[in-house]
Image: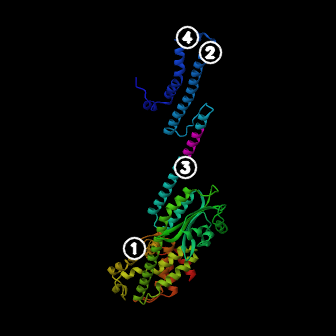
Amino acid sequence: MAKLSPKSLRDQGVLQKLVVSILLMAIIPLLLIFYILHTEVSEIFEKTYIRWLFFLILCSISIGYVLSRKIVVSIIKLAKDVEYVTRTDLKRQIETTDNDEVKIVAQYFNEVTNELEKNIKDLQESKELIQNVLSRIGYAMVSFRRIESIFELTIETLTNALGAKSGAIMLYENQLLKIMVSYGLPETLKKSFTVKKGEGIIGLAIKKNESQNVSVDENKEMEVEVKKGIAKHSLICVPLIYHDKVVGAISIHDSQRKKKFSNDDLFLVENLAPQTAIAIENRRLNQDIERTYVETISTLALAVEAKDPYTRGHSRRVAEYCLKMADEFKLDEETKSTLRDAAILHDIGKIGIRDRILLKPGKLTQEERLEMQRHPIIGENIIKPIHSLSKVAYLVRHHHEQLDGGGYPDGLKGNELTLSLRILTVTDVYDAMTSSRPYRKALSEKEAKEELIRQSGTHFDPEVVQTFIKMI
C-alpha cells in the first residue's frame, strides 16, 4: 500500500479526499468511544443518555459522509460531463437532477458552450465567406481582361457576402467621389451620385482616411447618404489609399439585418481595400498609356494618308459614313465608338507596305498584290497591344472580308461577319470607288451604287447595301 502523504493526497480524486477528510473528522470521537468501551468505568456506558450520545455521533458521521459523498459524486459527474463535452461534442447539454450550485454551474457551462458553438459556427461561416470572396475575385483576375469586370465582380460578391442591399466602388477625382461601378443601385443614381470631401459618412471617411461603420440611428452625418438615396439605415465606407493618396472608396449599404454591420464585415472590406486601390491606380496608368498609344497610332494613320494624296481624307469620310449607318441600325454608343475608331484606323497597316507598291500608278503584280493584302494583319498587330481596342483590332483585320468567303486574310463568310464589319466593308469600298487612284479615275455616285448592288449577296450584305444607298 502506497504511503499516504500530503503530497500524494493532493493528487487524489475528490472522492478519495472526502473519505480521508471524514476519517480525520471522525477519528477523535471514534477513539473516545473505543476508550470508554474498554475502561474500567464501563458502568458509564450503561447509562441511557451515554448510549444515545454514542449512537448520535455514529449517525452524524454516517449521514455527513452520505451527504458529502452525494455532493462530491455530483461534482465528479459534472467534471466528467464537462470533459466529454469539451473533448467530443459541444452541442451536448449537461443535465443534472441537483437543485443547488452544481445545477447553476451546469447551466452556466451550457450557456458558455452554446455561445462557443455559435461563435465557432460564425467563424466557420466567415472563413467560408472570405474563401468564397477571394476565390471569385481571384478567378476574375485570371479570367477577365477588362479591369472594370473585376471591379464589378468584386462589389457584387462583397455586397452579397455581407448580406447588404447595395455597394459601390468610387473614384476620387477633382475633389469629388463618383461611382465607377456599383451593384444593387439604380443606373440613374450611379450616374448622378457625387460626394464632396467631408460630406456625409463617405466624405468623412475620405477626409479622415479612416474606415466608417455606422447606422443612421447613431450618426446623424449619414443623413446625407439617406437624402441622396444611396443608403437607408446602415453603411460601411473604407477609403482606398495608394501611396498615402486617396484614389477612391468602397461603400456597402443597408445590412439586411437592418442594423449596423458587424466588425467582421468591416474587417473583410478593409482587407480588400488595398488590392482594390492598387487595381484602380493601375487602371489609371494603363488608361494614360493607352491614350498615348491611341494618339500615336492615330497620328500614324494620318501619316499613311499623307503619303498618298489620292487617299487623303478617306478614313475620315468612312468614319462619317459608319456613324450614320450605326444610327440607321440603331447601334448602341459603345458599338458606334468602336466602329468609328475602326474606320479611322482600318488602313493603319499600310504604313508597313513599301511606297513602291503603295504608290504604284499601274496594276499590281501577283506578288505585289499579296504584299498589299498583308496590311490588315499589320494593322491588327499595331492595335492589338491595346486591350480596350480589341474589338477595333478585329474590324481592322477583317475589313476586306466578303460575304461569300472570297475576301482576305481569313476568308470569313456569312454569319462570321459581324454587322459592324459588314457596315465598314461597304462604306470603305464605296469611298474607295468614288475616289480617284493613280491607276483609275473615280466612279460616279451612280456607278458606285450600281457596283454595290451588283456585288450585293456575294461580296456585301444586301440589307447593309440597301440601307447605305437609301442613306446617301
Q: Circle 1 sits on which residue?
A: 409
- Front disc: 1 or 2: 2
The secondary structure that dominates the magenta segment is helix
Earlier sequence position, callout 1 versus callout 2: 2
Q: Circle 3 sits on which residue?
A: 122
Secondary structure beneath dot 3 equals helix
Q: Which residues are magenta?
A: 107-119
Spatial distance from mark 2 to mark 3, Cα to Cα? 65 Å
Earlier sequence position, callout 2 versus callout 3: 2
Q: Circle 2 sits on which residue?
A: 52
The quarter of the picture where the N terminus appears is: top left
Task: Residue lying at the far front in this picture: please name it.
Answer: 41
Measured as percent of width and height from the top left, residue 50 is found at 61, 14
Secondary structure beneath dot 4 equals loop
Asked whether residue 399 appears in the rendered view, the answer is no
> Are the two marked residues, 1 and 2, in contact with CB atoms closer than 8 angstroms?
no
Which of the labelled discs sits on residue 41, or is there none?
Answer: 4
Q: Residue at x 52, y 11 (%)?
A: 39
Secondary structure beneath dot 2 equals helix
Q: Amino acid at mark 1?
A: Pro
> Are the two marked residues, 1 and 3, in contact with CB atoms closer than 8 angstroms?
no
Measured as percent of width and height from the top left, residue 234 is found at 63, 61
Q: Nearer the viewer, residue 178 or 89?
A: 89
